[in-house]
Image: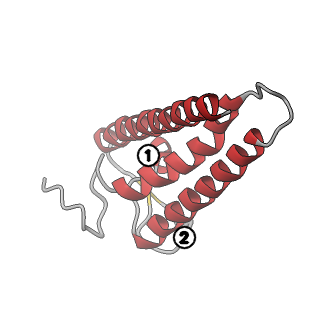
Amino acid sequence: MSKDLNSTNYIPGTCNIGKQEIRQRQVVALIGAVLTVVVGIGLLSNEDPNPPRFFIFFPALVFAIGFVQSRKKFCLAYGFAGTFNFGRLGKASRVASIEDRKADRKTAINIFMQSAALAFGITVVYTTLAFIFN
């Protein structure tokens, strides 16, 4: 099976969302990025000399999940649920094949791990810079 990433069709383990769903993931990434900046500034302006700067991880994870999903054209929640959507937002269809659901779950786990790694990297960079410049 061809892995055409510009496809508007479900491709097991590769593509399970259409343009509207991708746009929704981009909005989530933007919200996560804004939250990351706001929390980061809040932690830097805190009176406590050593605030728990690792809390930046959580908004960074929101950003990372939205970002990775939009880039991969794959929703990890749909992957775990065994569904896909190329129509209106929230109008998911069920994946019929057990093999396809397994491929989707594997991709969903992979996307979560990539997102967690990206959020961890952001946390390390932020914490290091905050330590150096504070």
How far from the left and from the top, in percent, is residue 37? Answer: 65, 51
- Comes first in the chain, label 2 or label 1: 1
> What residue appears at the point 51 percent right and 35 percent down from the top-left corner?
125
Q: How is the image coloured?
A: secondary structure
Q: Position of residue 133 (x, y in %)?
A: 62, 35
Amino acid type shown at disc 1: Gly
Q: Nearer the viewer, residue 50 or 114?
A: 50
Please state the total of marks drawn on the protein image.
Answer: 2
Residue furthest toward the right?
47
What is the spatial separation of the Cα atoms under label 2 and label 1, in whole angstroms? 16 Å
Q: Quadrant of the C terminus?
A: top right
Q: Could you tell me which residue is drawn at 47 percent across and 46 percent down?
A: 76
Image point (32%, 56%), residue name: 15
Q: Is residue 86 left or right of residue 60?
A: left
Q: Where residue 132 sits: x, y (%)?
A: 59, 30
Q: Which residue is mark 1?
A: 79
Q: Secondary structure at mark 2?
A: loop
Quickly name the residue at label 2.
89
- Report the disc number at residue 16: none
Q: Is residue 129 above or below residue 38?
A: above
Q: Residue flagged by tag 2: what amino acid is it?
A: Leu
